[in-house]
Amino acid sequence: MEFIESAVKKAFLDYKIETSQLHQHKLITNDQKNHVFAQNALQDELDTCTDFFISVAFVTQSGLCYLKTHFADLARKGIRGRLMTSNYLGFNNPDVFRSLLEIENIDVRIVEKEGFHVKGYLFEQNGYHSLIIGSSNLTANALKKNIEWNVRLTSLENGEVLRESKKELERMWHEALPLTEKWVERYAKNWQSLTRDKLVTDVDEKAIYSVARPNVMQEKALENLANLRSEGKNKGLVISATGTGKTYLSAFDVQQVNPPKMLFIVHREQILKSAIKTFKMVIGGVDEDFGILSGNSKDITAKYLFATVQTISKPQILNLFSKNDFDYILIDEVHKAGAASYHKVIDYFDPKFLMGMTATPERTDNFNIFELFDYNIAYEIRLQEALEEDLLCPFHYFGVTDYEKDGVIIEETTNFENLVAEERVKFIIEKIQYYGVSRHKIRGLVFCSRKEEAKKLSEIFNNRGFYTDFLSGEDSISKREEVVERLENGELDYIFTVDIFNEGIDIPSVNQIIMLRNTQSSIIFIQQLGRGLRKHGSKDYVTIIDFIGNYKNNYMIPMALSGDMSYNKDSLRKGTFDTSYITGISSINFEAIAKERIYKAIDDVKLDSMKSIKDAYAKLKIRLNRVPMLVDFLEQKSIDPYLIVSGKVSNIKTYYDFLLKNDDTIGKISELENKYLMIISREFLTGVRKQDILLLSEMVKGREFNRKEIKVLFQSYGLDAQERTIDSVLNTLNLNFFTGLLAETYSGGEIIEAGQKIQLSVGMKKSLLRNSYFKLLLEDLLSASFIKSESYDKSRVFTLYKKYRRRDVIRLLKWDKQQIDQNIGGYIRKDDEFAIFITLEKGAEFSGAMMAYEDELLSPNLLKWYTKAPRTMSSPEVKAILDYYISGLNMHIFVKKSDDEGTDFYYLGKVEPQLNSIEEFHKPTNDGKTKSVVEMHLKFLEAVDYKLYRYLTNIE
C-alpha cells in the first residue's frame, strides 16, 4: 500500500517524491537517441509477472518477435496468459495468427467487430497489478520506432481503474472467438490485403537501389573515392557490411569515372552474373559492352569485363592482355586476395585505379588487405551503422537454449550420436517453429558444427516432412548453385552446411538463419548472420535462431552483436542483459537460461591473456601500418588498453613492457621512467577521475601551479574544485595516498612535488627533457586516460553503474590514505562518508567472520544489509546510521554479483536507512557459537536501473 500511495503522489502531486520503480506511474515513449523503447517496458513486465492479458487491435509477426523469448521463459515457469486481437480492417496478416498458434502458453481470442481499436497490456505482479494503455499496438514500429504515447499505471486489487479495466477485458473476452486453425484458414481466404501488399513490396524492393540516386552509404563512398583519385591515389578499399549494396556502389563509381575498359574480378561465376545485371541497370549501354571471362565464356574484348579469378589467373589467359589494358579494376570479396591466384592478377596489371570491396577486412590468415590498398580506406560501414541507415533487412535474433537431457548440455565435444539424437531433433524443430519466419514460408540456412552432423540432420529433417539439402566444401560450384537455386525457387526449406556459406553467397530471399554450432569468432558470427540481411520483397525481417550450448566461446556472442571489441567483461555482460543498443526495429533476445550460459562463459574466459592482447594488437598494427598507441585502441574500438597494463599479464607493467616483448619499441626508457608509466597506467587509465589526468597533462606541457590556479583549471572544465578535491589529487600524484604493498611498489616514483609551488618531480622533469620517447609514451597514456574519463559523469563523485576498485572509492571520497582491501572488508566509514561493498553471490567457501551473510537486493529500491560481526546497536557505525538524519551521513553502495566478476564493484548509488528496520541478531557461526550482527533495510535514493537489478539478482 505504501509504495502505491507514494507512486500516486509522485505522479500527480509532486515529482520530487521518491517511490519504488516497480510501482511507478510513468509515460512510456520511444526514444531512439537514448535507446529507450515501449518494447523494453513490456519485456520487463513479462519477466516478473504471474499472469498477463494483452488486448490490441493490431499484431505483426515482427512485433510478436520482441516478446517470444519472454513468453518461452514464462512457459518454463508454468505461467500462462491471454491475448485478444481482431480482424479489424484486415490489418493482421494471416501469418501472425499462425505464429500465435505456435505459442502454447497463450490463449488467443479474436474480436470480430468493426472499430475495435484497444491497446492495453495488463500484468499481475507480486502484490500489485500494472496496466499499460495508450497508442501502441503489438507491432514493431509501434513498440520501437513510431512516436507513441503510453501510460503505465499500477494498482492494488481493489483499485477502481484496475477493476473497471479487468471487467471490460473479461466482457470482451467472453464475446470473442477462440483462435483456431479453422478460423485462420477462413480468414486467409477472405483476406483482401494480399494484392495491395504485393504491390507495396515490389515497389520497396525496386527502391532499395535507385539507378538515379545512390543510397546514403553509396553517396558518401562515391565522394570519398573521387577525393582519393583527386589526391593522386590509385587504390581504394571499401569496407561495407553484407547487403549494403557494394556491387551497386562499384557500378556507380565506374559510372562516375567512365573508364575506357573495366575489369571486375569475382571468385564465383554466380556472383559474376548477378554483378553484370547490376552494372547494366546502373550504367546502361548495349549488351556487347558487357562480357564474361570464365570457364565457359571468353568475351575478352568487352568494355566491361567480368571475370572469375580462377580463369583470369591462368598464365595463358593473362598473356592475352597487356598490363595496362584496364583503366579500372574491381575486386569483390577482396579479403580473399591473399591467395596466389589473386596475387598473380594484381601483380600483372597496372590499372589507373584499383578498388577492393569486403565486409570482413580482419583476417585470421595474417594477410594484410590494408597494405594491398596502401591503407586508403575510402569508406567503412559496419553492421550497426548499416542498420541505422536502413540499408539492411531488420532481424530478430533469438539466443535459445540448446538441448539438455539429465543435466547434460550440448558442448564442443558432444558425441555425434547426441547431436543427431531424436530428442534433440524434436527439440530443434519445436524451437524453429516457435520462433518462425517472416510470412511463414521458410527459406533457411542451417550452420552446423560438423559435416556429418549437417548431412544427417538434413536426412532426418526430410523424414520429418521438410524439404532440405546438404552442402559441403566437397561439392562442386555447379552443385552449390543448383541447390541455392532450388532454395530461392521455394523447392527447399533449408540448406544444411558447415562453413561454405559464411561469405560470398547471395541469397536475398533467405529469411531464417539457424546456428547449431558454437561461435568460432565474432567475424564468422557476423558473416553467417549476414547471409540473411539483404533486403528482399518476400520478407519483412530475418529470424536468427542461435542454439546456445555449454560452449567456451559463448562470450563472443554479445561481442559480435554489439560490435564491442574492447574485451571488457563488464561491457560484454551489459551487452547480454541490455540489448537496447540494436538499431531500428531489429531486436536481440535471449532466453533466460541462454543468458546464464553466456554469463558463465564471460566469467570463465581469460580475456586479458597475452594471446588475446597480442591478437588485438596485431590486427590494429596491420590496419594502421604502424605501431599502435594506446589512444588508437580506443579510437579504433579495439581492446580496452587497461587490460594491457593492469598487471594481470606476466611481466607486463606498462605498454612499454608490452612493446618491448614484441620488439616494437622505437626507443628506450629507464627503470624509473617505466615506473612513472606503471603508476599512471594503474591509477589513471581507468579514467575514474578527470582532475588527476587534467592536472598532470598540463604539467607535462611545462606548466607549474599554485592551488588557486589548480582551482581555476578544474573549474574551466566544469569539474569539482573544492579544497578537499585538490588535496586528494595532489596526495595521489605525490604518492602519499598509497599504503602497504602498493606504497612499496610505487616507492621512488613520485610524479609531482606539492609545496608552495606545485610542479613535476625532479626525476619526471629530467626524464621529459632528455627522453623524447618517454614523453611520447606518457602523452599517449594521458590522452587515453582522458578519453576513458569522458564516460564518467563529472557532476557526481561516482557515476551510477560504473565499476570501481576499493581504492578508487577511497580516493574519490578524498580520504588521505588508501585502506588495504582486507582491512576494509564489507564497508568502511570516515567522517560523514560510508562506503559499503557487497558481493551478492558469496559462494560456498565464503565465511565472513565465520558467518553466512545474507545481503540481498530486495527490489530496485531496497537493499537488505548486515553489518560485520560482532556488532551491536551501540557499535560506532550502527550509531552513526541511527543518527543518519542528524549527521548527514552519505551512504554509498557498491555491488558485484560474485567474485567471478573480479575485484571491481558496480556503484548503485546512495541509500538512506529505514530506521524502523534496524535490528540486532545473534547468528550462528561455523564453529557452533553465535555472534551479534545488525540487520537493516537501506532504501536507494535513486532506484537501481532495472536491467542491471535483474542481472545482479538473477530475476528473469
Image (tube, rainbow, N blue to C red):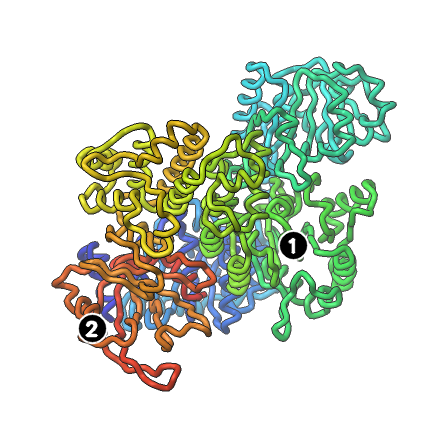
Disc 2 element: loop
What's the amino acid at mark 1? Ile
How many C-alpha atoms fall within 10 Å of the one at disc 2: few (<14), some, or many (≥20)? few
Q: Is residue 344 left or right of residue 945?
A: right
Per the image, the residue denoted by label 2 is: 875
Spatial separation of the CA atoms under disc 1 and disc 2: 60 Å
Query: Quadrant of the rendered structure where residue 699 is?
Result: top left
Residue 107 seen anywhere in this rendered image of the structure: no
Residue drawn where x is 63% and y is 48% of the image? 511
Per the image, the residue denoted by label 1 is: 514
Query: Quadrant of the rendered structure where residue 549 is?
Result: bottom right
Instruction: From the viewer's side, name the closer residue of 843 and 413.
Output: 843
Residue drawn where x is 56% and y is 68% of the image? 104
Q: Is residue 646 above or below residue 635?
A: below
Instruction: From the viewer's side, name the closer residue of 285 and 468.
Output: 468
Q: Is residue 100 left or right of residue 365?
A: left
Instruction: From the viewer's side, name the closer residue of 300 and 538.
Output: 300
Mark carried by residue 94:
none
How many C-alpha atoms fall within 10 Å of the one at disc 1: few (<14), some, or many (≥20)? many
Instruction: From the viewer's side, name the closer residue of 775 and 351.
Output: 775
Q: Position of residue 711 (x, y in %)?
A: 20, 37
Quarter of the image where the C terminus is located: bottom left
Q: Is residue 491 above or below residue 264?
A: below
* Numbered-mark total: 2
What's the amino acid at mark 2? Ser
Query: Quadrant of the rendered structure where residue 598 is?
Result: bottom right
Q: Nearer the viewer, mark 1 or mark 2?
A: 2
Q: Position of residue 183 (x, y in %)?
A: 58, 63
